[in-house]
């Protein structure tokens, strides 16, 4: 009768080898993923923290989060959580991006504004502190134009302008903003 010890020892050795192989494969995949991120420039999905700023002073006025995907071929898509807009008031952003120098990119996107809302600003008549602070918006669209600069493979910054148009094409507000981007991996 044959002992089960050699078989158990062989199984333990094979299991150990399998675990080591999985760990090495995971490290290699992670390194390849990082190398791929380093080589793809701006392309991919980014978590973006946007800060609306006073154009005159640069002072921060509000902050909110967005997700931006820079697609191959130079298009982009965006989704945001800005509390300045009522639920469903602003559609997703779509636009273009292009390289403009080493690790620098220009982006421009447009988003529809689906309905009007009145302003709700502290210190103005009718201000309601129970509602989100908002400058108010008209039905139409907004255009965001930013200059993006890669810091490294997973971090970038951007700054630029925001323009708001009524549905007849009349520009009624401009603004400034900056953003911190972190690549979603």
Image (tube, grey):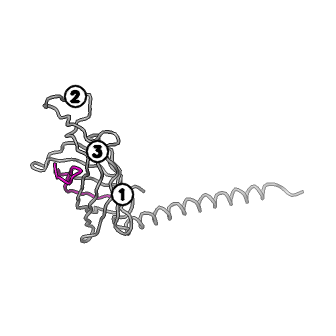
Furthest residue toward front: 168
Residue holding disc 2: 128
In three-dimensional space, the C-alpha distance between marks 2 and 1, rounded to whole angstroms, equals: 33 Å
- On whether residue 63 falls in the magenta region, the answer is no
Give the extent of the magenta segment: 155-177
Picture coordinates of residue 75, whole percent (x, y): 35, 64
- Viewport quadrant of the C terminus: bottom left
Viewer-side residue, 138 vs 178: 138
Task: Tell me which numbered mark, 1 or 3, is placed earlier along the sequence.
Answer: 3
In three-dimensional space, the C-alpha distance between marks 3 and 2, rounded to whole angstroms, equals: 21 Å
Q: Quadrant of residue 74?
A: bottom left
Picture coordinates of residue 10, whole percent (x, y): 73, 60
Residue holding disc 1: 77
Tag 2, which secondary structure? loop
Residue holding disc 3: 64
Please give the name of the residue rendered at 78% of the width and 58% of the height, measured from the top-left corner. Answer: 7
* Magenta segment main secondary structure: strand
Choose mark 3 or mark 2, whichever is in front: 2
């Amino acid at each position: 009768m044959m002992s089960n010890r050699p078989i158990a020892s062989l199984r333990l050795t094979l299991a150990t080898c399998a675990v080591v192989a999985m760990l090495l494969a995971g490290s290699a995949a992670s390194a390849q993923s990082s190398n791929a991120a380093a080589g793809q420039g701006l392309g991919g999905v980014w978590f973006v923290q946007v800060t609306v700023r006073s154009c005159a002073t640069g002072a921060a006025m509000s902050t909110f989060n967005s997700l931006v995907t820079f697609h191959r071929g130079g298009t982009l898509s965006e989704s945001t959580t800005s509390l300045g807009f009522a639920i469903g008031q602003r559609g997703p952003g779509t636009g273009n991006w292009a390289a403009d120098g080493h690790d620098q990119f220009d982006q421009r996107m447009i988003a529809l504004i689906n309905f009007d809302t009145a302003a709700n600003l502290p210190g103005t008549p009718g201000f309601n502190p129970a509602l989100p602070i908002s400058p108010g918006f008209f039905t139409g669209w907004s255009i965001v134009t930013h200059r993006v600069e890669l810091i490294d493979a997973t971090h970038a910054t951007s700054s630029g302008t925001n323009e708001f148009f009524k549905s007849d094409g009349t520009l009624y507000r401009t603004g400034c903003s900056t953003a911190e981007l972190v690549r979603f991996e």
